């Protein structure tokens, strides 16, 4: 299960509910795990790099990092483990296929669900400005006149391209628990098809 959305859209909170309440073990292999605990400090945020071109020394590594990331997700799934992935995609530094089509190819044959985690920019800025214990200084906040930082706007514009999902959730309108319930219902329905569509389009 891949939860795709910009930073502070609520992906990690949904993943935590899934790990706590869904049947069986759900391994969280999200971008934060790879950025904070796997990637060497001098190459961070690694695959969590935002759109914008601020770190040309890291950009060249992004295609390989995403490829290894999704190969790891696929390996866990093939061992019979459930996997929840919270990530923000953008194609600024990706492989020729694009991040999502390449991920779809690597997950081919697996029951992979792609969920778009959407949140209006106003709600995201409220969360950024309020801060979060343990993540002090990690997120860009509003300017002195309430200006939204350009990197935040870039995330908002790019993270949901091309917008092919099995399910979309607006986290400004539902709690993490309600979002997890929507995902549970989706898992009980028809087989997911978004990654198959993305693989076919590559």
Image (cartoon, grey):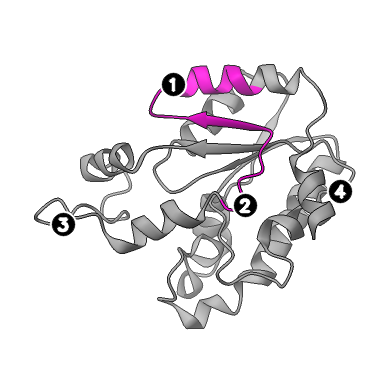
Residue 106 visible, this orientation = no
Do labels 2 and 4 touch, CB within 8 Å? no
Horizontal side, residue 150 vs residue 158: left or right: left
Specify the quadrant of the image occupied by residue 191: top right
Q: Please name the residue shown 46% across and 48% down the image.
A: 6
Do residues under tags 1 and 2 come within 8 Å of each other at their CB atoms? no
Q: What x and y, as percent, mark residue 14?
A: 52, 30
Binning the other alpha carbons within 10 Å of mark 3 as few (below 14), some (14 to 19) or many (20 upward) gives few
The N terminus lies in quadrant:
top right
Q: Which residue is mark 1?
A: 174
Q: Which residue is mark 2?
A: 162
Closest to the observer, 124 or 12: 124
Residue that carries the numbered disc 3 in the rendered image: 143
Q: Is residue 144 left or right of residue 45?
A: left
Mark 2, other Cα within 10 Å: few <14 / some 14–19 / many ≥20? few
Q: Which element type, helix, strand or loop, lies under badge 4?
A: loop
Question: Distance from label 1 to label 2 (Cα)?
Answer: 24 Å
Q: Is residue 167 left or right of residue 150?
A: right
Q: Secondary structure at mark 2?
A: loop
Q: Which residue is mark 4?
A: 108
- In the orientation shown, which residue stands out farthest toward the bottom? 57
Element type at mark 1: loop
Q: Position of residue 192 (x, y in %)?
A: 78, 32
Number of other residues with Cα within 10 Å of mark 1, as a class: few under 14, some 14 to 19, many 20 or more: few
């Amino acid at each position: 299960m891949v939860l795709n959305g910009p930073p502070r859209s609520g992906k990690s909170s949904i993943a935590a509910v899934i790990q706590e309440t869904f049947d069986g073990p759900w391994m969280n292999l999200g971008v934060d795990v790879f950025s904070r605990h796997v990637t060497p400090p001098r190459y961070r945020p690694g695959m969590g790099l935002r759109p914008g071109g601020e770190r040309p020394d890291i950009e060249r590594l992004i295609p390989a990092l995403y490829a290894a990331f999704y190969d790891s997700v696929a390996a866990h799934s093939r061992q019979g483990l459930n996997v929840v992935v919270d990530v923000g995609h953008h194609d600024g530094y990706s492989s020729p296929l694009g991040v999502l089509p390449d991920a779809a190819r690597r997950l081919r044959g697996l029951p992979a669900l792609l969920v778009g985690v959407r949140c209006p920019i106003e709600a995201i800025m409220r969360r950024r400005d309020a801060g979060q214990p343990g993540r002090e200084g990690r997120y860009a906040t509003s300017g002195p006149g309430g200006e939204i930082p350009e990197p935040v706007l870039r995330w908002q514009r790019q993270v949901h391209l091309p917008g092919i999902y099995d399910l979309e959730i607006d986290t400004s309108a539902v709690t993490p628990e309600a979002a997890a319930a929507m995902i549970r219902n989706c898992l009980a329905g028809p087989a997911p098809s978004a990654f198959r569509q993305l693989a076919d389009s590559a």
